[in-house]
Image (spheres, helix red, strand yellow):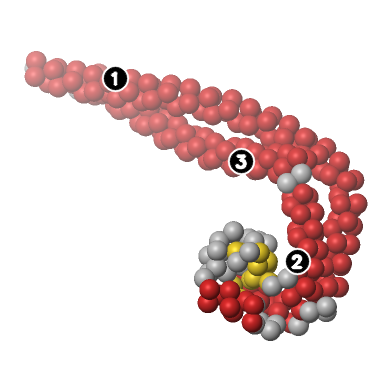
Amino acid sequence: MDQHTMLWEYQQEDMKADKLASEIRRSPLRQKMENDRNQYMERQKQHKQLEEQVAVLADRKDAIRDALNRCEEQLKGLQNRFETNPPADLDEVRNLISEVNKCHETIANYEREMKRLVHEANNHNQRGMSLRTEAARLRGEFEQLKTQYDKEMPAKKAALDAQRAVAQAKADELPASLMEHYLRVKKHITPPLSRLINGQCSGCNTSLPSAVLHQVRNANDELVECVSCGRLILRI
Protein backbone atom coordinates (compact mmCIF):
# COMPACT_ATOMS: atom_id res chain seq x y z
CA MET A 1 0.00 0.00 0.00
CA ASP A 2 1.52 3.36 -1.01
CA GLN A 3 1.87 6.24 1.40
CA HIS A 4 -0.93 8.29 -0.17
CA THR A 5 -3.44 5.47 0.37
CA MET A 6 -2.19 4.97 3.93
CA LEU A 7 -2.51 8.69 4.61
CA TRP A 8 -6.05 8.72 3.20
CA GLU A 9 -7.02 5.83 5.44
CA TYR A 10 -5.50 7.64 8.40
CA GLN A 11 -7.61 10.70 7.59
CA GLN A 12 -10.77 8.56 7.56
CA GLU A 13 -10.05 7.36 11.09
CA ASP A 14 -8.88 10.80 12.22
CA MET A 15 -12.11 12.40 11.00
CA LYS A 16 -14.16 9.76 12.84
CA ALA A 17 -12.34 10.67 16.05
CA ASP A 18 -12.88 14.38 15.43
CA LYS A 19 -16.58 13.75 14.84
CA LEU A 20 -16.89 11.92 18.16
CA ALA A 21 -15.06 14.75 19.93
CA SER A 22 -17.33 17.29 18.28
CA GLU A 23 -20.43 15.35 19.32
CA ILE A 24 -19.20 15.41 22.93
CA ARG A 25 -18.52 19.16 22.80
CA ARG A 26 -21.84 19.94 21.10
CA SER A 27 -24.07 17.61 23.06
CA PRO A 28 -27.23 19.41 24.30
CA LEU A 29 -26.40 18.38 27.86
CA ARG A 30 -22.90 19.87 27.72
CA GLN A 31 -24.16 23.04 26.05
CA LYS A 32 -26.83 23.45 28.72
CA MET A 33 -24.18 22.96 31.40
CA GLU A 34 -21.92 25.57 29.83
CA ASN A 35 -24.85 27.97 29.45
CA ASP A 36 -25.79 27.57 33.12
CA ARG A 37 -22.17 27.98 34.18
CA ASN A 38 -21.73 31.13 32.10
CA GLN A 39 -24.98 32.62 33.37
CA TYR A 40 -24.04 31.76 36.96
CA MET A 41 -20.66 33.49 36.57
CA GLU A 42 -22.40 36.51 35.01
CA ARG A 43 -24.83 36.74 37.95
CA GLN A 44 -21.88 36.53 40.35
CA LYS A 45 -20.14 39.31 38.47
CA GLN A 46 -23.29 41.48 38.49
CA HIS A 47 -23.78 40.87 42.21
CA LYS A 48 -20.21 41.91 42.96
CA GLN A 49 -20.70 45.09 40.92
CA LEU A 50 -23.88 45.85 42.88
CA GLU A 51 -22.04 45.33 46.17
CA GLU A 52 -19.39 47.82 45.04
CA GLN A 53 -22.09 50.33 44.04
CA VAL A 54 -23.88 49.89 47.38
CA ALA A 55 -20.58 50.49 49.18
CA VAL A 56 -20.12 53.75 47.24
CA LEU A 57 -23.68 54.79 48.15
CA ALA A 58 -23.02 53.96 51.81
CA ASP A 59 -19.89 56.12 51.80
CA ARG A 60 -21.84 58.98 50.24
CA LYS A 61 -24.63 58.64 52.83
CA ASP A 62 -22.03 58.80 55.62
CA ALA A 63 -20.57 61.95 54.06
CA ILE A 64 -24.04 63.54 53.85
CA ARG A 65 -24.79 62.69 57.48
CA ASP A 66 -21.56 64.43 58.48
CA ALA A 67 -22.50 67.42 56.34
CA LEU A 68 -25.98 67.55 57.89
CA ASN A 69 -24.45 67.48 61.36
CA ARG A 70 -22.24 70.41 60.41
CA CYS A 71 -25.25 72.33 59.11
CA GLU A 72 -27.13 71.67 62.34
CA GLU A 73 -24.14 72.90 64.32
CA GLN A 74 -24.01 75.98 62.11
CA LEU A 75 -27.69 76.70 62.80
CA LYS A 76 -27.13 76.32 66.51
CA GLY A 77 -24.20 78.71 66.24
CA LEU A 78 -26.38 81.26 64.44
CA GLN A 79 -29.06 80.86 67.11
CA ASN A 80 -26.52 81.35 69.89
CA ARG A 81 -25.15 84.39 68.12
CA PHE A 82 -28.64 85.83 67.82
CA GLU A 83 -29.32 85.24 71.52
CA THR A 84 -25.97 86.43 72.88
CA ASN A 85 -25.34 89.22 70.38
CA PRO A 86 -28.64 90.32 68.81
CA PRO A 87 -28.48 92.23 65.50
CA ALA A 88 -27.98 95.97 65.99
CA ASP A 89 -29.79 97.06 62.84
CA LEU A 90 -31.91 95.87 59.95
CA ASP A 91 -28.94 94.96 57.75
CA GLU A 92 -27.56 92.65 60.40
CA VAL A 93 -31.01 91.05 60.74
CA ARG A 94 -31.18 90.50 57.00
CA ASN A 95 -27.66 89.01 56.93
CA LEU A 96 -28.49 86.65 59.77
CA ILE A 97 -31.73 85.56 58.08
CA SER A 98 -29.82 85.01 54.84
CA GLU A 99 -27.31 82.75 56.60
CA VAL A 100 -30.11 80.81 58.26
CA ASN A 101 -31.94 80.38 54.93
CA LYS A 102 -28.76 79.14 53.25
CA CYS A 103 -28.35 76.54 55.99
CA HIS A 104 -31.95 75.40 55.60
CA GLU A 105 -31.57 75.24 51.81
CA THR A 106 -28.37 73.21 52.14
CA ILE A 107 -30.04 70.86 54.61
CA ALA A 108 -33.01 70.42 52.24
CA ASN A 109 -30.68 69.60 49.35
CA TYR A 110 -28.79 67.05 51.43
CA GLU A 111 -32.05 65.50 52.63
CA ARG A 112 -33.28 65.14 49.03
CA GLU A 113 -30.01 63.53 48.03
CA MET A 114 -30.14 61.23 51.06
CA LYS A 115 -33.66 60.16 50.09
CA ARG A 116 -32.47 59.42 46.55
CA LEU A 117 -29.50 57.43 47.81
CA VAL A 118 -31.67 55.38 50.15
CA HIS A 119 -34.08 54.62 47.31
CA GLU A 120 -31.20 53.65 45.01
CA ALA A 121 -29.60 51.50 47.71
CA ASN A 122 -32.91 49.71 48.33
CA ASN A 123 -33.24 49.00 44.61
CA HIS A 124 -29.69 47.64 44.53
CA ASN A 125 -30.37 45.44 47.54
CA GLN A 126 -33.52 44.03 45.94
CA ARG A 127 -31.63 43.43 42.71
CA GLY A 128 -28.86 41.75 44.71
CA MET A 129 -31.34 39.40 46.36
CA SER A 130 -32.78 38.54 42.95
CA LEU A 131 -29.30 37.86 41.56
CA ARG A 132 -28.42 35.62 44.53
CA THR A 133 -31.63 33.65 44.06
CA GLU A 134 -31.02 33.27 40.34
CA ALA A 135 -27.37 32.30 40.90
CA ALA A 136 -28.42 29.64 43.42
CA ARG A 137 -30.94 28.23 40.94
CA LEU A 138 -28.38 28.12 38.14
CA ARG A 139 -25.79 26.47 40.37
CA GLY A 140 -28.27 23.81 41.48
CA GLU A 141 -29.31 23.13 37.89
CA PHE A 142 -25.67 22.98 36.80
CA GLU A 143 -24.83 20.45 39.51
CA GLN A 144 -27.76 18.24 38.49
CA LEU A 145 -26.71 18.38 34.84
CA LYS A 146 -23.09 17.67 35.77
CA THR A 147 -24.14 14.57 37.69
CA GLN A 148 -25.93 13.31 34.61
CA TYR A 149 -23.05 14.35 32.35
CA ASP A 150 -20.51 12.54 34.55
CA LYS A 151 -22.55 9.36 34.23
CA GLU A 152 -22.66 9.55 30.43
CA MET A 153 -19.12 10.82 29.85
CA PRO A 154 -17.03 7.68 30.59
CA ALA A 155 -18.65 5.66 27.79
CA LYS A 156 -18.32 8.52 25.31
CA LYS A 157 -14.73 9.19 26.32
CA ALA A 158 -13.90 5.49 26.02
CA ALA A 159 -15.32 5.45 22.47
CA LEU A 160 -13.30 8.55 21.60
CA ASP A 161 -10.09 7.11 23.10
CA ALA A 162 -10.61 3.88 21.17
CA GLN A 163 -11.06 5.76 17.92
CA ARG A 164 -8.04 7.95 18.61
CA ALA A 165 -6.03 4.76 19.17
CA VAL A 166 -7.16 3.37 15.80
CA ALA A 167 -6.12 6.61 14.09
CA GLN A 168 -2.80 6.72 15.97
CA ALA A 169 -1.98 3.16 14.92
CA LYS A 170 -2.26 4.22 11.30
CA ALA A 171 -0.29 7.41 11.96
CA ASP A 172 2.55 5.34 13.42
CA GLU A 173 2.94 3.61 10.05
CA LEU A 174 3.51 6.91 8.23
CA PRO A 175 6.69 9.00 8.01
CA ALA A 176 6.88 11.76 10.62
CA SER A 177 7.40 14.41 7.93
CA LEU A 178 4.18 13.36 6.20
CA MET A 179 2.21 13.58 9.45
CA GLU A 180 3.70 16.98 10.24
CA HIS A 181 2.57 18.24 6.84
CA TYR A 182 -0.91 16.78 7.38
CA LEU A 183 -1.29 18.36 10.83
CA ARG A 184 0.01 21.71 9.61
CA VAL A 185 -2.63 21.88 6.87
CA LYS A 186 -5.33 20.62 9.27
CA LYS A 187 -4.85 23.72 11.43
CA HIS A 188 -6.24 25.79 8.56
CA ILE A 189 -8.74 23.49 6.83
CA THR A 190 -10.53 20.24 7.61
CA PRO A 191 -10.36 17.66 6.25
CA PRO A 192 -6.82 18.41 5.09
CA LEU A 193 -6.72 15.78 2.33
CA SER A 194 -8.60 15.69 -0.95
CA ARG A 195 -8.55 13.43 -3.97
CA LEU A 196 -7.93 14.23 -7.61
CA ILE A 197 -11.19 13.48 -9.44
CA ASN A 198 -11.66 14.41 -13.11
CA GLY A 199 -8.96 17.05 -12.87
CA GLN A 200 -10.60 18.64 -9.84
CA CYS A 201 -9.84 18.92 -6.14
CA SER A 202 -12.52 16.86 -4.39
CA GLY A 203 -12.38 19.22 -1.41
CA CYS A 204 -13.39 22.44 -3.15
CA ASN A 205 -14.38 21.08 -6.61
CA THR A 206 -12.01 23.50 -8.32
CA SER A 207 -10.48 22.53 -11.65
CA LEU A 208 -6.74 22.49 -11.26
CA PRO A 209 -4.28 24.12 -13.67
CA SER A 210 -2.45 21.75 -15.97
CA ALA A 211 0.86 22.45 -14.23
CA VAL A 212 -0.61 21.40 -10.86
CA LEU A 213 -2.22 18.32 -12.44
CA HIS A 214 1.15 17.35 -13.85
CA GLN A 215 2.71 17.82 -10.41
CA VAL A 216 0.09 15.65 -8.68
CA ARG A 217 0.26 12.86 -11.27
CA ASN A 218 4.03 12.73 -11.44
CA ALA A 219 5.03 13.32 -7.84
CA ASN A 220 6.19 10.22 -6.02
CA ASP A 221 5.44 10.49 -2.33
CA GLU A 222 5.44 14.26 -2.32
CA LEU A 223 2.19 16.07 -1.53
CA VAL A 224 0.85 18.90 -3.65
CA GLU A 225 -1.44 21.55 -2.20
CA CYS A 226 -4.57 22.71 -3.98
CA VAL A 227 -4.03 26.25 -5.26
CA SER A 228 -7.60 27.12 -4.27
CA CYS A 229 -8.33 25.61 -0.84
CA GLY A 230 -4.85 24.53 0.31
CA ARG A 231 -5.75 20.87 0.87
CA LEU A 232 -3.21 18.16 0.09
CA ILE A 233 -4.24 16.41 -3.11
CA LEU A 234 -3.81 12.64 -3.30
CA ARG A 235 -3.77 10.73 -6.56
CA ILE A 236 -5.81 7.73 -5.37
Q: Position of residue 28 (x, y in %)?
A: 75, 40
Residue topped by disc 2: 11
- The quadrant of the image that shows the N terminus is bottom right
- Which residue shows up at 77% across the image and 49% down it? 23
State whether residue 154 is above or below residue 235.
above
Badge 2 local density, few (<14 within 10 Å), some, or many (20+)? many
Q: Where is residue 175 in the image (x, y as percent from the top left)?
A: 76, 83
Q: In this view, does 110 lie to the left or right of 20?
A: left
- Which residue shows up at 79% across the image and 58% down it? 16
Label 3 sits on a secondary structure element that is helix
Cβ–Cβ below 8 Å for labels 1 and 3? no
- Which residue shows up at 45% across the image and 31% down it? 61
Residue topped by disc 1: 104
Earlier residue among tags 1 and 3: 3
Q: In this view, does 223 lie to the left or right of 33?
A: left
User: 230 or 2: nearer the eye?
Assistant: 2
What distance separates the C-alpha of mark 2 from that of mark 1? 84 Å
Residue 192 appearing in the image? no
Residue topped by disc 3: 42
